[in-house]
Image (tube, rainbow, N blue to C red):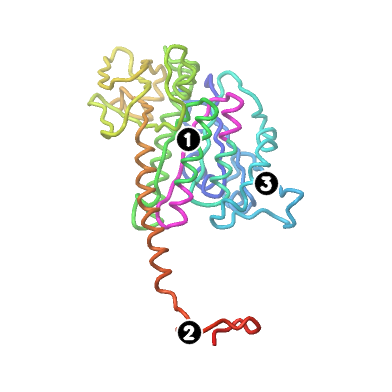
Amino acid sequence: MATNRLIVLGIGGAGINATDKALKNLRNLGEGFADVEYHFMDTSRNNYDNIEPIGSFYQTKRLVSNDKNVINGAGGDRQGIAAEILANVPDFLDSIKLSKKETNTFVCVIASTSGGSGGSGLIGVVDALMEKGIPCFTVIIGDSGDALKLRNTQAVLATLNHKAVSKGKCLISYYVNNAEMDKSQTVGEKLANERIANVMGVMSLFLSGDNESLDSTDMANFINQQDYKGIKTPAGLYSLSFHKGVGDIKLPEYCLPTVARTLTKPGLDVAFNLNVLHHKIGNVVHENVFAKFGENAFPLHIVASSGLLKEEINQLSKLNEASAQRQNDLKSTMIDAPVHASMDEDTDMFF
């Protein structure tokens, strides 16, 4: 049994479905990987009832001031349901006994930022976890496929950065943009799920607690770089990337790497070419891990960096500006009343 526990929280419909399609096999990886448990939160049971019931489900409850019988995801109406979702977060975390920091426990929150309930739930849950000092990271499923999705995605990313800064935390996030995967939605989601599965398999390995010279404290410090006593990494949203094999580690030019962790085979030299604030190397001790990944995957690196998510937000901003301009252009095509016509107040008609 692994030393460490990895708790996966699937928030909203996309978080539930992605966990089912990409992450449920994490529990079957065996020796050398973290013990994984799953919990879900959504505004209705519709999505959860359509997946394998691999964990507990919490359905958000309506506020007393809400005269509706249920809370709906509302197809992207984040503002309309945000207060409802946030009010439920403490009860959700209490229901799964995730109310305080515990040694050897890590949390991954996975959700879509493009719709209604997932983005608001993601913000509320991560904000609460950071407040409690519980080591957490996120898998973010963004989407720039249309004006509403890209606006929501940019807003959620910006809010997460704001929350991290206000809490004095470095929030590590792995970001997938569904719209960039493939023109076909079905194929795009499949590719996104494959990426998420690969990422979380690697994180389960690093977070297992079973690796020599790379313990839970080392990984907690990777997730929140602010915990380092001698390193003053600015608080905010940081991107997570993965690199395997003996070749050079390459990041986009606009990325600044901050901390890194490496796992390798005993006796295998590691060439690490990135200039980072802190780097630590450990050894894999379970043969099962090499059977899963293949020995040529090692050394295996995870890197936190600034810049990547900033560039994503810049791209979303450009798309949002184009969308706003198009909306203004549409106004100019609307039909005007005849010259000298006036509105009759009784009939609400032009004459």
Q: Which residue is mark 2?
A: 340
Distance (Cα) linking label 1 and label 2: 52 Å
Q: Residue at x 56, y 34 (%)?
A: 126
- Judging depth in this view, the residue of 134 and 157 nearest the camera is 157
Whether residue 140 appears in magenta in the rendering, the answer is yes
Q: Residue at x 48, y 81 (%)?
A: 337
Pick out the residue farthest to the right: 64
Q: Answer with mark 1 or mark 2, whichever residue precedes in sequence.
A: 1
Q: Amino acid at mark 3?
A: Thr
Q: Residue at x 58, y 43 (%)?
A: 121
The kind of secondary structure element at disc 3 is: loop
Distance (Cα) linking label 3 and label 2: 54 Å
Q: Residue at x 37, y 15 (%)?
A: 280
Q: Say the numbered circle drawn on residue 161.
A: 1
The kind of secondary structure element at disc 2 is: loop
Q: Give residue 305's position: percent from left, percent from top.
A: 36, 29
Q: Say the numbered circle drawn on residue 60.
A: 3
The kind of secondary structure element at disc 1 is: helix
Q: Amino acid at mark 1?
A: Asn
Q: Give residue 5's position: percent from left, percent from top.
A: 55, 25
Q: Answer with mark 3 or mark 1, whichever residue precedes in sequence.
A: 3
